[in-house]
Amino acid sequence: MQRAASDPPQLLRSKFFWVALLYFSEGFPLGVFYELFPVYFRQQGVELKDIGLISLLGLAWTVKFLWAPAIDHYRHHRLWMAAMDVAMAAVLIGFAATQGFGPFVWVAIGAFTALSATNDIAIDGYTIELLDRRELGLANGIRIGFYRVGMLAAGLVLVLSDWIDWPAYERHGGTWAIQTKRGCPMPCSYCTYPVIEGRRLRCRPASEVVDEIEEAVRRLAPRTIDVIDSTFNVPLDHALGICREIVRRRLRLSLTTMGVNPLQVTPELFEWMERAGFNSMMITPEAASPAMLESLRRGA
C-alpha cells in the first residue's frame, strides 16, 4: 500500500524514535548542570566552595518524587513537557544576560533544576502511556541509553571548544568578540537591542573585562579584539574605565568597536581609546534628513 503524501516519514511514526528523543532531552540538562556549569564558573573566577554548593541545587532531581503525584494527577504530560522546556530556555536566557555570581544566579540554577526535574516526571508519564506492555523492555534500554547520550552531549560542547582552529579562523579575517555590558537605554525605533537585552544597563567591571581579554590573548593570540557592545561609549565613564585599565596593564592590543554614540564622544575618550589600542570603529549615518532622524528617534 502506497503511503499518502501527507503521511509523516516512517521514522517519525516510530514510538521508539520519540522515546529516544525525549530521553536525550531529559539527560541533556543534567549534563549541562554537572559538566558545563562548574567549568564555566571556574573560568569566571568563582571560588571552588561556591561551585561545590551549587551541586546542592541538583537535589531537585533526587526529591522530584515529592511532586510527581501532582503532575500525574493533572495528566496532560505533553503540555507539561512543552511548558517546562520553554521555561528552562527562558531561565537560561536570563542567566546568560546576568553578570557576576549574585543571588539571581542561585535562583536561576535552582529554577532550572526544578523545571528539569518536573520535565523528567512528565516525560516518564508520557512514555508509560505511549507504550504497550510488550514494548517496555526495548524502550527501557533506549531510555537509559539516550539519557546517557544526552548527558555526554553536554560534555561534548567542552571538548569541541578546544578543537576550534583559531589560527585558521584569524587567517580568514576572524576577530575575538567581547561584550562589556548588556542593555541599551537608547530610544532608536528600529533597534532590537532593548528588546533582546533590556533597557537597563548592566556593566561589567573594567577589571573583569580586561581579565577576559588577557586570557584570550594568552591562549589564542587573536589578531583583533572586537568590542561588540551596542554602543561602546554609553555610559562614557564605563568606556573610559576599560581603556584606562588596558593602559594600566600595558597590553599591546588591536581593538575595534562596532558602535560609538557621537553625542557622548569627547577628546578625552578618543585619547584613551587610541592609547588602549583602538584603531577603528563603526559609525553609521542612518539618514541625512532631519525628519527621518526624528522618525527613527536618533539623536536622543
Image (tube, rainbow, N blue to C red):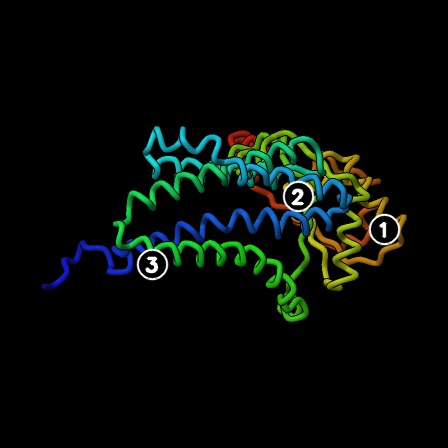
The residue under the point 32% across, 45% down is 128
Distance of label 3 from label 2 (alpha carbons): 51 Å
The residue under the point 75% across, 64% down is 221
Q: Earlier in the sequence, mark 1 or mark 2?
A: 2
Amino acid on which the number 2 mark rests in the picture = Asp
Farthest residue in the left direction? 1
- For residue 62, what is the image quadrant? top right
**Residue 94 can be seen in this image:** yes
Amino acid on which the number 1 mark rests in the picture = Arg
Distance of label 3 from label 1 (alpha carbons): 66 Å
Q: Nearer the viewer, residue 141 or 229?
A: 141
Q: Quadrant of the N terminus?
A: bottom left
- For residue 196, what is the image quadrant? top right
Horizontal side, residue 169 vs residue 2: left or right = right
Q: Earlier in the sequence, mark 3 or mark 1?
A: 3
Q: Which residue is mark 3?
A: 138
**Residue 196 can be seen in this image:** no
Q: Secondary structure at mark 1?
A: helix
Report crowding for label 1: few under 14, some 14 to 19, many 20 or more residues within 10 A (C-alpha). some
> Residue 115 location in percent, x, y?
50, 36
Q: Earlier in the sequence, mark 3 or mark 2?
A: 3
Amino acid on which the number 3 mark rests in the picture = Leu
Q: Which residue is mark 2?
A: 229
Q: Secondary structure at mark 3?
A: helix
Report crowding for label 2: few under 14, some 14 to 19, many 20 or more residues within 10 A (C-alpha). many
Q: Which residue is mark 1?
A: 275
